[in-house]
Image (cartoon, grey):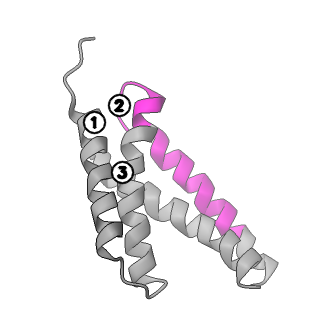
């Protein structure tokens, strides 16, 4: 369930940040900011639902998912296909995030 939350949080964060990007960099209306703020609030709430033992580990693990989702956004929304370096970097980050998430820890 944690990965589902991370994927939903990533979509909400990217959409919220893109709303600001569109307003600032693409000269869209300031009305783009309202759903952007709502989306960023949704992101924060979703991330807080993750069942990890510490906020820092949650954020670190989420980072790997965020990178993958960002490249998906690049491809699907912006129409730019990730290159091999994007994919290699994302794979490295995802491995690191998985190590942080799945490492055995004593309580």
Q: Is residue 68 magenta?
A: no
x and y, in percent, of residue 36 in the image: 66, 67
Q: Residues within 10 Å of mark 2 (few under 14, many from 20)?
A: some
Tell whether label 1 touches label 2 (CB within 8 Å).
yes
Nearest to viewer (mark 2 / mark 1): 1
Q: Which residue is mark 1?
A: 101
Q: Tell me which segment is drawn in magenta.
A: 34-58
Q: Which residue is mark 3?
A: 64
Q: Residues within 10 Å of mark 1 (few under 14, many from 20)?
A: some
Q: Secondary structure at mark 2?
A: loop
Q: Which residue is mark 2?
A: 52
**For marks 2 and 3 on the same chain, the one whose residue lies earlier in the sequence:** 2
Q: Is residue 50 magenta?
A: yes
Tell whether label 1 touches label 3 (CB within 8 Å).
no
**For marks 2 and 1 on the same chain, the one whose residue lies earlier in the sequence:** 2
Q: Secondary structure at mark 1?
A: helix
Query: Which residue is painted at 26% across and 57% down in the image?
Result: 91
């Amino acid at each position: 369930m944690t990965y589902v939350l991370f994927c939903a949080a990533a979509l909400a964060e990217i959409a919220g940040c893109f709303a600001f990007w569109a307003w600032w960099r693409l000269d869209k209306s300031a009305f783009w900011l309202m759903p952007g703020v709502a989306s960023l609030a949704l992101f924060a709430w979703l991330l807080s639902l993750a069942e990890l033992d510490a906020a820092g580990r949650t954020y670190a693990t989420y980072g790997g998912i965020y990178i993958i989702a960002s490249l998906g956004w690049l491809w699907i929304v912006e129409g730019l296909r990730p290159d091999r370096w994007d994919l290699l970097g994302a794979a490295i980050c995802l491995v690191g995030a998985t190590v942080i998430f799945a490492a055995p820890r004593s309580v």
